[in-house]
Amino acid sequence: MRQRPVLTYPAVLCGCFFCGLLAGTIFANWLAGGSAAADGLAQYAARRGMNGAAGWFRLWGLAGLTMEQRRRLWAAAARQRLSEFGLAFLVGLTPLAPAGYALLAFAAGCGCGLAVSVLTLTGGFLGLPMFVISLLPQWLCYLPVWLMLARYAGGDAGRPRAGRCIFLAALAGIGTFFEAYVNPCLLRF
């Protein structure tokens, strides 16, 4: 009889994500000794373009963008997201794909923990709903792409086929449209 592994690949990815979430939260709270430090961290995160081409902390100003500015935002979001997914796809083709995706899950957890912490440090209790609103609706498209790429990296789904890759790229493209056009409207409320 074949024994089941103690730690499965999805469990390792979830563990790495939550460890990264904890690390990002600790990092943000460690750096934010005062209000000035939290503001500096927020400006740093905005310059880095965390979870969006416009950055997490310039979200309140997105509702009044002109169509040309939104088009440029969409182009920047598409360039950023499709390069991220392309890099993740290439990592998935290497022999060290499970370890690479564990590292990517840890990094994603760090980013989420940092964003939640800074938003709650600067905005109080309203930081949590702002975090959720800033993720929707684009992450309804991005999450399935990441999960399928991670499944390919774990070896559960074999190697990606051309049709599936086109579908994942289209889903990521729809997510960038949501990020540039729909999300700013949600953040206006």
Image (cartoon, helix red, strand yellow):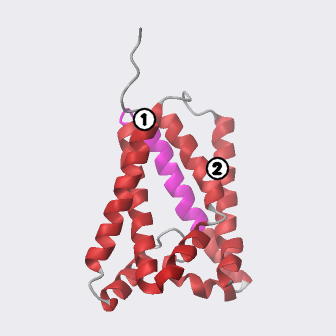
Q: Is 93 within the magenta?
A: yes
Task: Report x, y in % for residue 69.
Answer: 66, 82
Task: Report x, y in % for residue 99.
Answer: 35, 40
Query: What residue sits 35% from the left and 65% below the top?
Result: 24
Instruction: Name the image quarter holding the N terminus.
Output: top left
Outermost residue to the front: 125
At label 1, the amino acid type is Tyr
Magenta residues (range): 76-97
Q: Which residue is mark 1?
A: 9
Confirm whether residue 45 shows in the render. yes
Q: Is residue 180 above or below residue 10?
A: below
Q: Secondary structure at mark 1?
A: helix
Q: Main secondary structure of the magenta part?
A: helix
Outermost residue to the bottom: 36
Question: Toward which corner of the image does residue 30 lie, by quadrant?
Answer: bottom left
Instruction: Name the image quarter holding the C terminus.
Output: bottom right
Query: What residue sits 27% from the left and 78% below the top?
Result: 31
Q: Secondary structure at mark 2?
A: helix
Outermost residue to the top: 1
Q: Are marks 2 and 1 in contact (CB under 8 Å)?
A: no
At label 2, the amino acid type is Ala
Q: Which residue is mark 2?
A: 169
Q: Is residue 134 above or below residue 169?
A: below
First in sequence: mark 2 or mark 1?
1
Confirm whether residue 93 shows in the render. no
Q: How many numbered discs, if any?
A: 2
Name the disc covering residue 131, or none: none
Task: Report x, y in % for residue 148.
Answer: 57, 41
Report the front residue among 121 and 160.
Answer: 121
Classify 10 Å Cα crowding around label 1: few (below 14), some (14-19), many (20 and above). Answer: many
